[in-house]
Image: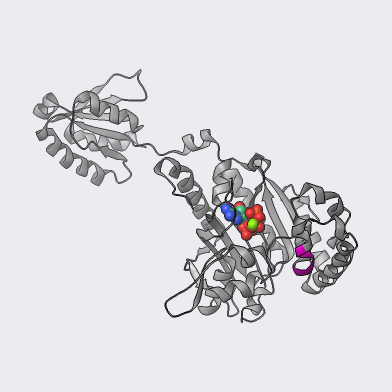
Amino acid sequence: MNDILPSEIAGWQLVESVFRDLMKTYGYAEIRMPIVEMTNLFKRSIGEVTDIVEKEMYTFDDRNGDSLTLRPEGTASCVRAALQNGLLHNQIQKLWYAGPMFRHERPQKGRYRQFHQLGVEVFGLDGPDIDVELILMTARFWKLLEIDQKVELEVNSLGSNAARHAYREILVDYFSAHQDELDDDSKRRLSTNPLRILDSKNPEMQDLISAAPKLADHLDTESKQHFADLCTCLDQCGIKYRINPCLVRGLDYYNRTVFEWVSSDLGAQATVCAGGRYDGLVKQLGGRDTTAVGFALGLERLILLLNEEFLLKSAQQPHAYLIMLSPEAQLAGRVLAEQLIDQNPALRLHVHTGGGSMKSQMKRADKSQAKLALILGEDEMAAAQVTIKYLRDTERDQETIAQAELGLWLKAFIQ
Ligand code: ATP
Ligand code: MG
């Protein structure tokens, strides 16, 4: 579990604010759920025999003896919240959330025990058009963050629950006939969650996996059409994708469309965003039959992909740093600074604190990345003026203006 330090925060804030604006563009509403839920919620939704529930959850008994769990993902909580608050009565909901998730995994690059997701969930729509909308908005997100060249889209269809169950039998037969070629994980999954074997990252398993029967050959007709329509629409919108027949996702509740955005820049933990349809989950958790689709993206991995130049370009440096060279100037300067902010609410003005020489204050001004130093010395105090020094544009000469005019001057400068 990591601290996110001031030196790292720029990327986080940028990604969060771009995402928030994107959600406004597409008309999605934010929802905030608690970080703990009843343990049963995750067992019933994610599935008893998934990695998450079997070995990754932070579960504890509270003082009443109720078993609670730090949420390992957002979808189950979001469905619970929507049901409990009556958001799903014959209504379409387009929701998003952001926050920390918790999984007791082996920590490594791109995999932490507290990590952060941005997630979107849509309820009440069953057509491929909404699946496409989710893919389009993620594609736009990469573009806005200037990482669209670093990610690739993979899609697949898991079909209806009935088709998937029938396929599961076929897959079990196939892998059972090759028992001796399975690694330990896959042997265990053969009886618990055989589709997950397809998702194995073990290179020694790849030949066996690519020769396995394909889910695509066992899809129901409706799901086939749904998937074909999805692909057509992606083509029309100019979104490039790869159909990956082995894409299955680790959670039990998915059906039909599944997709992942992956990046070869991330090493072993390549998936930055993953989503899909989960039409059965709402009913499974006690609601009426409600179709649903969503995705979650991992912020830590996303931030690893951001370019330095993009961050610099997007950084919001202070406009000005106020330097004051006597106790009287400190008092007058504080009053002046408040007036300047009153006049210019968008002004980013750092007021020097702690006194010190001109040299040491200039050093701090420089370090702040401010564009201007505003200097209040003895002469300026006597004449009710301020000296303005350009810290980044060193070609320009410093100038002196009346304190009473500084507010208007800054208004023009920050535009
Ligand atoms: P993976 O196996 O690639 O870690 P997953 O299938 O377990 O992913 P999901 O539950 O689909 O992950 O979560 C969606 C996204 O959240 C992932 O694609 C990834 O970006 C991020 N994520 C998941 N687990 C972690 C983790 N332990 N640390 C950091 N990010 C994570
Ligand atoms: Mg995982």
Quarter of image, ligand 1: bottom right
* Residue located 66% across and 72% down the image: 48
Query: Between residues 161 and 403, which one lies in front from this camera angle?
Result: 161
Q: Is residue 377 above or below residue 138?
A: above
Q: Is residue 165 left or right of residue 338?
A: right
Query: Does 259 sit above or below residue 369?
Result: below
Of 154 and 129, which appears nearest the observer?
154
State which quadrant residue 117 falls in.
bottom right
Quadrant position of residue 103? bottom right
Q: Can residue 251 be seen in this snapshot?
A: yes
Which of the 4 image quarters holds residue 224?
Answer: bottom right
Q: Which region shows up in magenta?
A: 188-192
Horizontal and vertical percent position of residue 32:
47, 66
267, 218: nearer the viewer: 267
Quarter of the image with the C terminus is top left
Image height check: is 315 above or below 358? below
387 relative position to 268: left or right: left
Residue 348 is situated, as x and y percent measured from the top left of the image, at 32, 40
